[in-house]
């Protein structure tokens, strides 16, 4: 009698655990159906990696070349004040365009999806950071006089779009994901104002459980844009 | 207490531990699946990534050649003890153009948004439009002749919209220079494009492709294009 009861309990426990494992395995299969690889996909993946590496290599090469150009430009203008002023304007332009690394006083802000468990009746959609949220924050920083902004290392330049495909956010055609680190250089008191002023963070993000932490820093480093800004369709007006 | 019972409980305990461990490992794997990584990307995504990397590689390759050429030209001037003013002028003109300090012309689209009796245009509408235009490759954008640069804010200050600290009002004329086909097809995508989305909301939006669009230079005496806080990092 007693033995039967034990056997029964044992059986039930085993069944429950087995079911749980099956569910898990299935979830993983779905999540990674991609990793569960067809041959063609593997080849593609290798190809993507190869091009990414090639890109990174040539990108470093360009880095060096640009430094060389800046140096030789400076050298060739050092004896002539007119040329020197032109050289300075070119350097400023390159800074404005986002083609150089910048540093200065400013803020660093971390924005993160709601870490709490989402209730069964609630929609996860309401508790994650969307591309639209990042656009609003960037706009508020610009309004507060930011001179340069980056999100997860992606510099905001003239041609930067912030969008999403599915649940992945893309900036400058690069995929980024929560937590988002937004850096801005500018007048600190004005920049931190986006936190306490009755703005988007207070009214929309925090009520949704999104975690936002802002801290001042006297040395914010903002990396350069790694893409190319070019003019193929616009011409100087004559 | 009998011996067989103890053995039995021990076995149950061991089985449970093993099963729990397996589950834990499973959870770990799920957590580690990185959605931004290329390991998790599907075939179409991989194709898109591949073509994006290729395009970017080509762009940067071209830029590299250009840069190396400029270095060589400067070197030549130095070697022959000549002034490099022509080279400087050329670079200055090119960077002024890219920054937005000059008037520019080119083909593209003009989008007009108007307040109607029921719906007004908000700063957020304009920001969405600008973002869509940039995604479609716009090289220069202006709203009511205020040039949109990388640090340009677009905010509501009732009853105006503020762009580059300048007040603008309806109708809002958004000009964009770029590939006109890309620009217009991105905006007029059926059901999900900007025009359909905002027309559905009852807002007045019109778009036209144009061959010869003029966009004026950034021109704001209050806010000069220079840095007060940011400095270039030089190694």
Image (cartoon, rainbow, N blue to C red):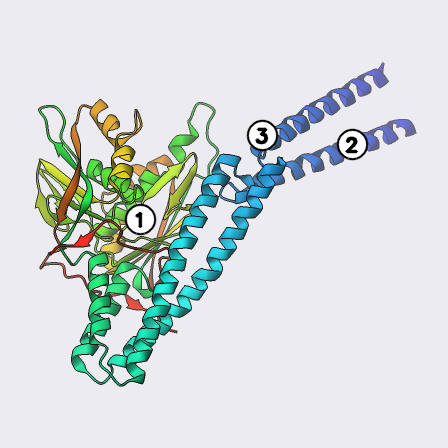
Residue depth check, mark 1 versus mark 2: number of the one nearer the observer: 1
- Where residue B159 sits, quadrant-wise, is top left
Tag 2 subunit = B
Residue at mark 2: B15
**Where is A127 relative to B219, above or below?**
above
Instruction: Describe residue B145's horizontal placement relative to residue A41 as left or right.
Output: left
Q: Nearer the viewer, residue B29 or A213?
A: B29
Please tell me whether mark 3 sits on a helix, a strand or a loop. Answer: helix
Instruction: Describe residue A174's horizontal placement relative to residue A233 as left or right.
Output: right
How far apart, in angstroms, are the residues tagged by discs 1 and 2? 55 Å
Quadrant showing the N terminus of chain A? top right
**Where is B233 relative to B205, above or below?**
below
Q: Residue at x 86, y 31 (%)?
A: B6
Residue depth check, mark 3 versus mark 1: number of the one nearer the observer: 1
The local crowd at label 1, few if under 14, some if 14 to 19, many if 20 or more residues have their Cα within 10 Å, is: many
| Residue lying farthest to the right in this orientation | B3
Residue at mark 1: A160
Q: Residue at x 19, y 49 (%)?
A: B148
How far apart, in angstroms, are the residues tagged by discs 3 and 1? 33 Å
């Amino acid at each position: 009698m007693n033995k039967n009861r034990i056997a029964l309990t044992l059986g039930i426990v085993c069944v429950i655990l087995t079911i749980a494992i099956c569910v898990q395995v299935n979830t993983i299969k779905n999540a990674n159906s991609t990793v569960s690889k067809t041959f063609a996909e593997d080849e593609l993946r290798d190809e993507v990696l190869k091009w990414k590496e090639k890109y990174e290599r040539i990108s470093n090469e360009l880095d060096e070349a640009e430094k060389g150009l800046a140096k030789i430009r400076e050298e060739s203008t050092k004896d002539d004040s007119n040329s020197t002023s032109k050289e300075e304007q070119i350097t400023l332009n390159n800074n404005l365009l986002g083609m150089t690394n910048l540093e200065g006083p400013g803020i660093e802000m971390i924005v993160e999806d709601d870490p709490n468990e989402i209730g069964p009746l609630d929609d996860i959609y309401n508790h994650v950071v969307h591309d639209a949220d990042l656009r609003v924050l960037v706009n508020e920083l610009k309004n507060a006089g930011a001179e340069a902004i980056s999100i997860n290392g992606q510099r905001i330049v003239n041609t930067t779009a912030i969008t999403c495909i599915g649940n992945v956010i893309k900036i400058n055609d690069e995929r980024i994901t929560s937590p988002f680190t937004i850096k801005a250089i500018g007048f600190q008191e004005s920049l931190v104002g986006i936190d306490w002023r009755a703005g988007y963070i207070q009214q929309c993000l925090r009520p949704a459980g999104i975690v936002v932490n802002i801290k001042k820093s006297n040395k914010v480093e903002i990396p350069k844009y790694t893409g190319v800004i070019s003019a193929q369709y616009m011409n100087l007006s004559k | 207490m009998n011996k067989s019972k103890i053995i039995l409980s021990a076995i149950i305990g061991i089985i449970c531990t093993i099963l729990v461990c397996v589950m834990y490992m499973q959870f770990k794997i799920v957590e580690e699946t990185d959605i931004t990584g290329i390991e998790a990307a599907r075939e179409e995504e991989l194709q898109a990534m591949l073509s994006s990397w290729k395009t970017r590689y080509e762009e940067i390759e071209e830029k590299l050649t250009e840069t190396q050429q400029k270095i060589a030209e400067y070197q030549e001037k130095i070697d022959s003890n000549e002034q490099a003013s022509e080279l400087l002028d050329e670079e200055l003109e090119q960077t002024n153009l890219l920054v937005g300090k000059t008037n520019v012309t080119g083909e593209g689209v003009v989008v007009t948004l108007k307040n109607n009796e029921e719906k007004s245009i908000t700063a957020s509408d304009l920001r969405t439009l600008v973002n869509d235009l940039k995604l479609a490759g716009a090289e220069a954008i202006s709203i009511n002749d205020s040039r949109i640069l990388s640090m340009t804010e677009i905010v509501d200050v009732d009853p105006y919209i503020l762009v580059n600290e300048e007040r603008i009002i309806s109708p809002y004329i958004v000009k964009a220079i770029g590939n006109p086909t890309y620009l217009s097809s991105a905006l007029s995508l059926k059901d999900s494009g900007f025009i359909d989305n905002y027309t559905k909301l009852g807002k007045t939006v019109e778009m036209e492709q144009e061959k010869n669009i003029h966009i004026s230079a950034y021109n704001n005496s209050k806010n000069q294009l220079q840095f007060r806080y940011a400095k270039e990092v030089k190694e």
